[in-house]
Amino acid sequence: MASDSKGLRKLRFSECTCPVCLCILIKPVTFPCGHELCITCFNQHVMKASLLCPLCRVRISVWVRRATRQNQLVNEKRWEEIQNAFPEKVKNRLEEKEEDEIDDDFEGDYYVPQIAEPGEVRKEFEEQKGLVDKDWLSRQREEEEASRRLIAELMDEEAKREEQERKDAELAAALNKQINEVCVYWLSSLNVCLCYLYTVHLATKTNCN
Ligand SMILES: [Zn+2]
Ligand SMILES: [Zn+2]
């Protein structure tokens, strides 16, 4: 087995690769089960998912919490060994992944999964309530408008009915007047006839005597 000037065993590259992304281990996180991932894969596949070792499925939640609290998530000794053994590969990997994968701010920050931002639920509730209130108000206004229209229609019908009744009464009065006039005419005509007949009768009687 190869070893360096200090007598330490020389690391093989295959021993320093992350089993998830298959690249050189950057800031390795070594679990109690002995498996290890680079910090990026750890954040993506363990912290944001299951808190299980992705290789042997051992639960590591307690260990993760403690290591995070003590700022000992990254195996610093191992990280130093890897950097010493493969400085070029580490440099290339860091440069290549600088933009999106290396989370330097992570250390000391325990990842807390959040369903919503603080205040977001309340904001959403207020928005929904505002929509419901607006909907209720507009419905209320529509109902008021509809009853106003109904009242106006009823009043209009009532006015028309009264007008019709007035016209009917006028017509009845006019007819009544006509009938009265006709009766008076016939009665006076009859009276004239009777007077004439009576006069004729008297004349006849006088002639006979
Ligand atoms: Zn990885
Ligand atoms: Zn494991």
Image: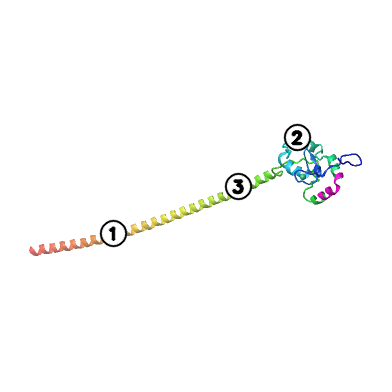
| Looking at the image, residue 132 lies above or below residue 163 | above
Per the picture, the main secondary structure of the magenta-coloured stretch is helix
- The residue at the far right in this view is 5
- Residue position for label 1: 179
> Disc 1 versus disc 2: distance between alpha carbons?
114 Å
The quadrant the N terminus occupies is top right
Alpha carbon of mark 1 to alpha carbon of mark 3: how far?
70 Å
Q: Earlier in the sequence, mark 2 or mark 3?
A: 2
Residue 25 is situated, as x and y percent measured from the top left of the image, at 80, 44
Q: Is residue 44 left or right of residue 151?
A: right
Q: Nearer the viewer, residue 161 or 178?
A: 161
Structural distance between the alpha carbons of marks 2 and 3: 45 Å
Residue marked by disc 2: 62
Which residue does the numbered mark 3 point to in the structure image?
A: 132
Q: Is residue 146 left or right of residue 205?
A: right
- The C terminus: image quadrant: bottom left
Query: Residue flagged by tag 3: what amino acid is it?
Result: Val
- Which range of residues does the magenta coloring cover? 84-93
In terms of image quadrants, where is residue 196?
Answer: bottom left
**Which residue appears at 59% of the width and 49% of the height?**
135
Q: Amino acid at mark 2?
A: Val
